[in-house]
Amino acid sequence: MDRKGLFSIGEVSKLFHISVSSLRHYENVGLLHPEYTSPDTGYRYYGTEQFEVLNTIRYLRALDMPLAEIEDFLKNKDISCIEEKLMQQKKIVLEKQQELKRVEQKINHRLNVLLEAQNTPLDTVTLVQLPASRVVWVEAPLKIEDSQDMEAPIRKLD
C-alpha cells in the first residue's frame, strides 16, 4: 500500500500531543482505527480522516467526558445527542465543583485550627465571652444503640 499522505502513530502522537499508548487504547476500545496497519510490522498509519475523530475525542476528554459517552457520540453524531451529553457532563462538573468547595472549606477550617493552635500561648488561661445558650442537664445517660432507640430519649429531653 502507498503510505503517501498517511502519518505513523508516532507522528500523530507528536502532532496531537497525545501518547502512543492512548492512541492504541482508543483503537482497542473502538474509538479510533488507523487507516492502515502494516501486516508485516504491525505499524499503524493514520490519515486526515482520523484527525477529525481524534480532535473530537481530545475535545470531549478535555471536558472529562467518559470514553463510553464519546463512543456513543461518534457513532450517532447527532446534535441533540451531543447537547444532551454536554448538559449531563456540565451537571457532573458542577457536582464536582461543589464537592471540591466542601473539601476546600474543610481544609481551610483545619488550617485555621492549626494556626490558632500555633498562636495560642501555652500555660495561659484566657477568658472568652461566648453568646448565651441553653444548657440541659440529664441525670441518667441516654442509651441509644441505633436510630430506632432515639425517639424515647429525645422525648425525655423535650
Image (cartoon, rainbow, N blue to C red):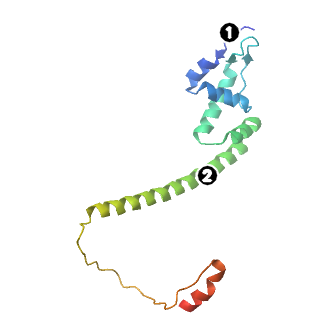
Q: How many marks?
A: 2
Q: Is residue 111 above or below residue 148?
A: above
Give the x, y percent position of residue 50: 68, 24
Q: Are marks 1 and 2 in contact (CB under 8 Å)?
A: no
Q: Secondary structure at mark 2?
A: helix
Question: What quarter of the picture does the N terminus occupy?
Answer: top right
Identify the residue shown where x is 72% and y is 39%.
73
Choose the circle earlier in sequence order: 1 or 2. Answer: 1
Tell me which corner region of the image, top left, top right, bottom left or bottom right, holds residue 77. top right
Is residue 65 visible in the rendered structure shown here?
A: yes
Q: Secondary structure at mark 1?
A: loop
Question: What quarter of the picture does the C terminus occupy?
Answer: bottom right
Q: What residue is shown with label 1?
A: 4
Identify the residue shown where x is 62% and y is 88%.
152
Tell me which corner region of the image, top left, top right, bottom left or bottom right, holds residue 63. top right
Give the x, y percent position of residue 23: 65, 27
Furthest toward the top, the residue is: 2
Q: What residue is shown with label 2?
A: 92
Distance Cα–Cα, label 1 vs label 2: 43 Å
Identify the residue shown where x is 40% and y is 62%.
109
Is residue 58 rendered to the left or right of residue 124? right
Q: Which mark is residue 30?
A: none
Q: Amino acid at mark 1?
A: Lys
Q: Is residue 49 above or below residue 58?
A: above
Q: Amino acid at mark 2?
A: Ile
Pick the residue in front: 10 or 62.
10
